Image (cartoon, grey):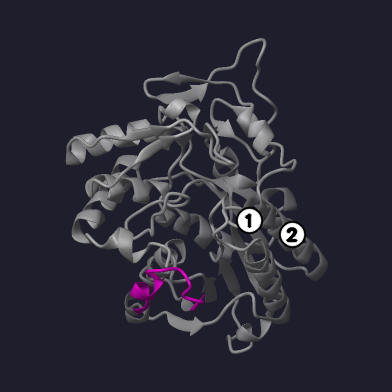
Amino acid sequence: MRILITGVCGFVGNTLALALATSGKSYTLYGLDNFIRPGSERNRTALRQAGVKLFHGDLRVASDLEALPPVDWVIDAAANPSVLAGVDGKTSSRQLVEHNLGGTLHMLEFCKQHHAGFVLLSTSRVYSIQALASLPVAPHKGAFQLSPSPASPLPTGVTDKGISESFATTAPISLYGATKLASEVLALEYASAFNLPVFINRCGVLAGAGQFGRADQGIFAYWINSYLRRRPLKYIGFGGEGYQVRDCLHPRDLVPLLEKQLEAHHVPSENRLIHVAGGVDSSRSLRQLSEWCADRFGAHTIGADVTPRPFDLAWVVLDSTRANQVWGWKPSIPTETILEEIALHAEQHPDWLDLSAPL
């Protein structure tokens, strides 16, 4: 089976490529990357040694795809992954749309040309900001948790297991979220119009060693690396308490699911879009993450800034029940293991935050 992974030198693409290359399966792996992410060049050597053939190209430029060989599947792990992209004054909104949505269009045209399957790695940020911000939550043991009441019941698409695929996607959802949601719709339309196998995996927060952590993305890696180096850290918004919660998933946990999807062609359309996330059991607040860091590295003072930050949310945890029902999938790598992996990598790479910082 011939597989192309876009964004192959990013954290997720690199992790998936190395896992598939060492799986013992008869995969021929190709990777595409434009190397604009600081630090991504470091992943070239390991990928080549694993037998992945690399191509330098930009998804925004259709002609860059002309040199790619025919493949059976594309796993699309290329995107600008920041919810602040295009609105933070540091990045271009046009480039965000060109990269995340235009790139999807070019890859779908590539798949149509070769009648290849397409797996889109999407995000939890496709959901309505207003609906997410209105979830009834209350602090408990250093973290927000759902706290429904007769006056504030849980909305459709939310249970004590988390947010399901049926939750509202009403705008606004951020420019980043809009590009990913539009990419999902486009992929499903190509699947219908051109009889292409397409799967959409909406991922929770992906984390692990080697992630290029920044405050607006890769928060687990960013926080642990910054805490270890005793760099300034702040709890932003929500009273400055650090109670905001996210779930956590290692991208290696995606591999068993991807291998099943790559072998499947006749799946009901309603099962082509699923959540793939660590869920409630993996969720942590920033305060709980700091407590873990204090136990691991010693004390470090965390500041507070009560000023709300755009698109920040108190509680986002995805429910992967459908993935379990359809594919028999559930995460296997505990959050504790993920955090320890990041910590060990941080200790071995004291320059990591500088390496992966914006230029």
Amino acid bearing label 1: Ile
Q: Residue 269: where, in percent of width, then height?
A: 74, 53
Query: What's the residue at 37%, 58% (across, down)?
Result: 211
| Amino acid type at mark 2 | Leu
Q: Nearer the viewer, residue 281 or 172?
A: 172
Q: Is residue 314 left or right of residue 168?
A: left
How busy is the neighbourhood of tag 2: few (under 14 within 10 Å), some, or many (20 plus)?
A: many
Give the alpha-carbon distance from disc 2 to disc 1, as whole Å.
9 Å
Q: Are marks 2 and 1 in contact (CB under 8 Å)?
A: yes
Location of residue 150 (image quadrant): top right
Residue 102, percent across and down?
69, 69
Label 1: few (<14), some or many (≥20) within 10 Å? many
Q: Which residues are magenta?
A: 31-44
Q: Residue at x 59, y 72 (%)?
A: 73
**Residue 135, x across and y down, in percent:** 61, 26
Residue of label 2:
188
State the SS at label 2: helix
Name the residue tied to disc 1. 200
